[in-house]
Image: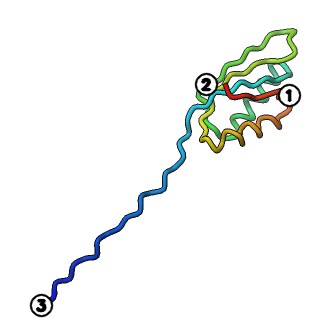
């Protein structure tokens, strides 16, 4: 009688997904409160999670400062900044 032994199972480890980590950014924009609201709407439309968002708007000042944290992978950081730079009224975006 012959004994058949099953072949040893070989499993490849599952590919690792890149983790989205909270990445802080500072964005300078023009247009006062309407400009900030337009930018906030655009950030929502990008589909990224934005767990923190704060704005510093002062009447009579030409630009507003937005501090936000966006959940991104390392590879998405540059793409995100490039997308934000193309939005109307954005003067600059820098990692904080």
Of the two numbered discs 1 and 3 on the same chain, state the one appearing first in sequence.
3
Q: Which of 21 and 31 is in front in this view?
A: 21
Of the two numbered discs 1 and 2 on the same chain, state the one appearing first in sequence.
2
Please tell me how crowded label 2 is: few (under 14), some (14-19), or many (20+) other residues with Cα within 10 Å. Answer: few
Query: In the image, residue 2 lies at what x, y percent?
Result: 15, 88
Query: In the image, residue 80 lies at what x, y percent?
Result: 71, 39
Query: In the image, residue 18 lies at what x, y percent?
Result: 54, 46
Work out whether 6 lies above or below 47.
below
Work out whether 15 lies above or below 88.
below
Work out whether 45 lies above or below 69.
below
Residue that numbered label 1 is attached to: 89
Q: Nearer the viewer, mark 1 or mark 3?
A: 3
Q: Which of 7 and 67 is in front in this view?
A: 7
Residue that numbered label 2 is attached to: 52
Dividing the picture into quadrants, the one containing residue 60 is: top right
Please tell me how crowded label 1 is: few (under 14), some (14-19), or many (20+) other residues with Cα within 10 Å. Answer: some
Residue that numbered label 3 is attached to: 1
Q: Which residue lies furthest to the bottom in this view?
A: 1
Q: In this view, does 2 lie to the left or right of 84?
A: left
Query: In the image, residue 72 lies at what x, y percent?
Result: 61, 38
Q: Which residue is drawn at 20% across and 83% down?
A: 4
Give how far apart the Cα atoms at labels 1 and 3 are: 82 Å
- Quadrant that contains the C terminus: top right
């Amino acid at each position: 009688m012959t004994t058949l032994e099953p072949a040893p199972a070989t499993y490849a480890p599952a590919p690792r997904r890149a983790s989205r980590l909270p990445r802080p950014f500072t964005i300078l924009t023009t247009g006062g409160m309407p400009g900030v609201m337009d930018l906030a709407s655009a950030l929502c439309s990008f589909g990224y999670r934005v767990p923190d968002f704060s704005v510093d708007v002062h009447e009579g000042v030409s630009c507003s400062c937005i501090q936000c944290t966006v959940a991104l992978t390392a590879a998405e950081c540059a793409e995100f900044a490039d997308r934000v730079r193309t939005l109307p009224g954005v003067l600059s975006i820098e990692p904080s």
